[in-house]
Image (cartoon, rainbow, N blue to C red):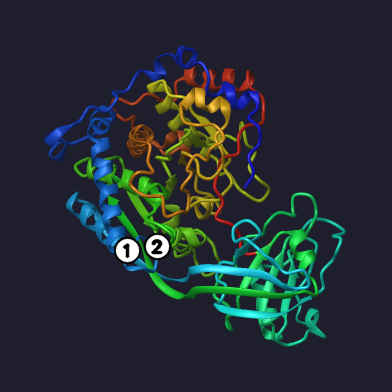
Amino acid sequence: MTQSHPSRRSRIAVAGTAGVLALAGSVVAALPAGAAGGNSCEHRDNNTVAKLTDCVTLDGVMEHLEAFQGIADAHDGTRASGTPGYTASADYVEDRLVDAGWTVTRRPFEFPYFQQTSPGALSRVSPDPATYVEGTDYAVATYSGSGDVTAAVQAVDVTIPPVGELNGNTSGCEDSDFDGFTEGNIALLQRGTCAFGIKVQNAVANGAAGVVLFNEGQPGRDALLSPTLGAPIDRAVPVVGVGYAAGVALQGATVRIAVDAVSEIRETENVVAELPGRTSDNVVMAGAHLDSVPEGPGINDNGSGSAGLIEVAENLGKVKPVNTIRFAWWGAEELGLLGSNEYVGSLLDAEGEPTPELERIGLYLNFDMIGSPNFARFVYDGDQSTFPAPAGVPVPEGSDQIEYVFEDFYESRGLYYEGTEFSGRSDYQAFINNGIPSGGLFTGAEVLKEDYQVLLYGGEAGVAYDPNYHEAGDDIGNIDEKALDENSDAVAYAVLTLAYDTSRVNGVAGRPVPGGTFEGDPAARQYRVERDEAAGGGGLHAGHDHGGVGV
């Protein structure tokens, strides 16, 4: 993942809150800051923005995060899908939502599980012995098999130096590439046109005892490769990825590769809860992934989004919204957005077309990491005013209006915010691929905070938004409570606003939420026009990437 230098557009969008409020006029009349609601919240109908955000409290969200931490502590420090810690997390979500009056369904599915159980090893035995550092010089491939192999490295149809267009190399993509390959050698395969899993499967079928995958070599395609094979390979062998230069240097050498990992098919589940509205054909859906990585408890990633949704759900239990509300806690997100893709895929027909059940979903909101310790406030850029979506990533009509709902909230509180790329690299992917307007919030992962952002949010420049991203240190201390409190209210505001009326998103009429701040007011539209005209393009790339299975 890369991060560009912020442009003037990125800075202007978050600067001068007083001016923002003046431009937006009455549209951004201040919302309450969330005083504690006390026991009254358990009994009242929180059918206004003021009531709901009053009852959605930091203490409430932290209670759920403490529960997730306790679950991880009791289950080998993790809540990863396919482990007892994940099942206990799903039990907790179900219990809380049932008690709050929601209808809960648990949807099991099989998925490819992977966990590296001890540090790997990569070394050149001869000539010129050298030891490589995991995470710096090499990475164990996701779904690598286990093994400890010392053998000669044999290049298979590689192109050194690289020529032609990016992603044009076919190394290992065809069985015939291995004509003349010596059984028992380690195959050296170059990044290119086909998936890493195909390359490795072909290598294994031709007798490779291990595989080294290396980057293609053109500018921008020469860094350390951290590949995923997509699923366990039939005959498991150790597989690692390296950068282009390391791959070139390993040709013909004798190399040791050691990997100790679990790579197998397991079962996990999504937890889906529904609160009926006055209508059932325009469902407002929101989701957060429930699983952690195997390395830690996953309190920010993504206990924060999961806990925020639980807290909002518990305080919506007595509301009778116009539109049915559906919340989902996704499984196996950390292995490639598997739970959300499984859910949406189950709502497609045999030809891959949306069924009436999928078409009932009017929009989707995604909350993945909303309390990063060195946070920024990022809103997915549905209008693409800062970030044109990457090629091949659809942004359904109405996604811009979802972005504006979140902007309305931040502006009403006088809070800075920025856009982040609508890249398709989180659980909204399957929804936008099927034409469902989507949006959401994010507070940053492994990308480094920039100097100007310290003035806006505090924190430390040159340090990752979440220094413990995908690490054991993502525990209960890895949260900025201010960001978590504000963003939990933002979740509540957006869900309730859209549960009353989605006309701005998909044209389905409802009625404005009592106490809301945006009702299609021309002043708000004019504010956005003036803001964007003053700004221009560019901006800050801050999304996190769960990787790909191939090129």
Is residue 283 in view from this perspective?
Answer: no
Residue 394 at x, y = what percent? 60, 47
The reply to whether discs 1 and 2 touch (Cβ–Cβ < 8 Å) is yes
Q: Tell me the element at label 1.
A: helix
Residue 173 at x, y = what percent? 74, 73
Residue 92 at x, y = what percent? 25, 57
Q: Nearer the viewer, residue 313 or 545?
A: 545
The circle on residue 80 is: 2
The circle on residue 85 is: 1
- Vertical placement of residue 217 versus 300, above or below: below
Q: Nearer the viewer, residue 330 or 131?
A: 131
Which quarter of the figure has residue 176?
bottom right
Label 2 sits on what residue type? Ala
| Cα distance in 3D space between marks 1 and 2 | 7 Å
Label 1 sits on what residue type? Gly
User: At 34% from the left edge and 35% from the top edge, which residue is drawn?
Assistant: 481
Q: Quadrant of the C terminus?
A: bottom right
Which quarter of the figure has residue 134?
bottom right
In the figure, is residue 208 to the left or right of 329? right
User: At 31% from the left edge and 47% from the top edge, which residue is drawn?
Assistant: 307
Residue 538 at x, y = what percent? 66, 31
User: At 43% from the left edge and 60% from the top edge, which residue is drawn?
Assistant: 295
